[in-house]
Image: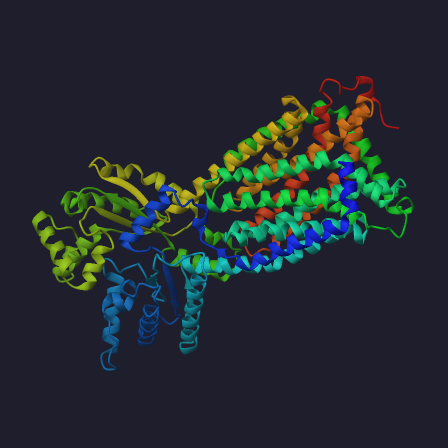
Amino acid sequence: MQAFTEKLISHRKIVTTLAIILTLFWGLNLVNLRIDGGFTSVLPESDPDFLFNQSIEEEFGSADEIIILISNDDGIYSRETTELITGLSEALADISEIEGERIIDMVSLYGFNSPQQSGETEQLAELENFMRNDPLAAGTINSSDGKTTMILAPVSGEISMEDEELRALVRELEQIVEKARVAHSGFEILLSGHPVVNAEIMDKMANDLYLLFPIAITAVALMLLLILRSLRGMLIPLVITLMSVIWTFGLKGLLHSPLTITETVIPVILISISCADGIHIVSEAFHFMHHGMDSKTAIVRTIGDLWKPVTLTSLTTALGFASFIFSSGRSLRNMGLFLAFGVITAMIFSLFFIPVLFSWYKPTVKHENRSHYKRQFKLLKLIEHATEFFLRWRLVIIVIAAIVLGLSAFGMMNINTDTDEIRYFKEGNPIRQTAELIETEMGGLSMLQIILEGQEDSFRELSVLRDMETVQKTISARPEVSSVVSLADTVSYMYYLMRGRSVDYFEIPDNQNFINRLLLISNSGEEDRSSMLSTYVNDDFSRARIMIRITDSNTRVLEKLLSDIDSDLDVFRTRGLSVGFAGDYLRVSNSRIIVESQVLSLTITLGIILIVLSIIYRSLLHGLIVSMPVVIAVLFNFAVMWLLKVSLNPATAIIAAVGLGVGIDYSIHIYSRLRLLRERGESPRSCIVNSATESARGIISNAASVGVGFLILLLSAYRIINDMGWIIALTMLTTSLSSLILLPCLLSFLPGNKPSAEKLNKKPA
């Protein structure tokens, strides 16, 4: 490898030119990047739940709604309110992406016409009475205090969540709402709904990219400058990092792969991880220069010593990310593949391009005269004493590690999973505040659909409608449910209308022939009645749906609801009807896929690391020992998540892969140094102590720079990205400390490494 490095340096102009040309090529593809803010990006296109939901949308229409919240402290039952609602609904109906015929507001529900001046009071009183007492209207879109109402506008299922079309729609809606605010200054008018939330996610994703990328570069540059104490030394790993980011995103652009919410952190992750090899190489080269070598000799010697651990650490990190290829979710799968590509790119640049750049380095002050290195030696001496202390207490440390492992495994098993995109945002975000207002006061944003399927005309039967009514009453009694509507309500409501709007007749008629005639009349009657029927049953009455509005969109709440009502749905199953779920049920599917991906990536990453290390070191035991400190440290962070109630979500799902993939680097460097020292003939005690001591400088520098890089994610607009940032930063701390403390203790038990009791108990001079 040293001969090859020397050859690269001898052709450094050609190598540099080629690297610049290739980087420019990848950079030109950055213009093709697109953003996908939809939460379904975690789901695979072939997922049965996803496909089933699509079929329901095709048959019944999209369940996604634009929600306009209108509030007035003086009350909403006024002429101005009706005019405001009418104007907004008409403006919404003119938008092609909105299904105008399905817009719901209190004016259209009542069939209200703007009253004449003389009869205004009476007609408004009738409107209020209708909204408070009508069996279907009451408690749906108006608040109980009569100060807030909603307009619900269904969005076409054809609109793409990854295109500019959605953002353009929301911008048009914002203009409509702003115009209404100006015309009706006494009202508070807010815009919400899942499409609005997704558009906000897209905007924040773009903002995060523009904000976090330069901050991360600056932070890592300052850390490198602090660690290396050389401006030109800092620039070398920084250039490598930037090139790997450009190549990675250039590949995404070339393949027209959309950027999902989890992938917005790819630049920060690559910036933090890609500089790791550069730090080890430049730091080691400076160490040789401190002993009198020139830059060319120092870098050739460094590459000769470090190319194996650099290659091994990069491969394990890349394979850790690549383990997400087995994830069924598109977002996680793409993220893992592109991060793996970025890590390998950074490794190639580190081994082949850093020597070229470093060969031009001519220090103005000889390294052996720098006071910085004298301070480093004092630090290394302190680490040497600490390592000897830990070795003396190695049994105690191993027992503590075993206890931590057990507690961490328990925490991991009990961690909460949440895919509610409203909680992606920080608490002060206006979109989140509006959504939470709707949840607490207006019944909620989330809509769970229970889909029942049977033979043709199954849902005309009186007995089936009765069962549906009974199940609805049971579900409605639950505190997290604000409303439940189905075909049973539609039939009851039609009977109620036929009987002169008498509350006593809001029930399912106890006569099958009468129900058949009622449904026949409704299907061929007024458009509003026909539309109301088609919302809950298909044309041949073989498929029906029960719509459940939930006050809390938290995935855990939804999972508990599904679990609790499952036995209630057996009444349909015993009839031979199939029971399925759609709408916000996809969040449960998301949660399942995230957990599966987490377990799978953790298992595969650990398996890959064990296999690679066992092959390289020709011993399964050695591979297991080198891996163990990192595994314990990574699992410990899941325990921290459990204790602090941080959920597992599309962002935090990558923590295991990052922790294992990056953290294993520290153990590999220590063990590789130990093998190198053994080859040089040092004693077992000296090998163990010096392997930790000599690796500590690079490990601490690496962990600090990577940790600081991830802490930049605290500036993200997303709470889940904030959580991912500080947890991975903590992971860097725990994995580095575990490698420096626990690994020497474990290595001391290996045959050939075991120091004598006398040497272990000997106090350092």
Indicate the quadrant containing the C terminus: top left, top right, bottom left or bottom right. Answer: top right
In this view, the residue in front, 199 or 571, is 199
Indicate the quadrant containing the N terminus: top left, top right, bottom left or bottom right. Answer: top right
Indicate left or right for 26 with 134 as reference. Answer: right
Quadrant of the rendered image containing residue 91 = bottom left
Image location of residue 153, percent across then percent down: 33, 63
- Residue 640 visible here: no
Image location of residue 14, percent across then percent down: 73, 51
Indicate left or right for 747 with 561 as reference. Answer: right
The colour scheme is rainbow
Quadrant of the rendered image containing residue 694 = top right
Indicate left or right for 44 with 404 as reference. Answer: left
In this view, the residue in front, 687 or 351, is 351
Residue shown at the point (30%, 64%) measured from the top left: 103
Residue shown at the point (26%, 67%) measured from the top left: 108
Q: Determine whether 342 is above or below 130 in the image.
A: above
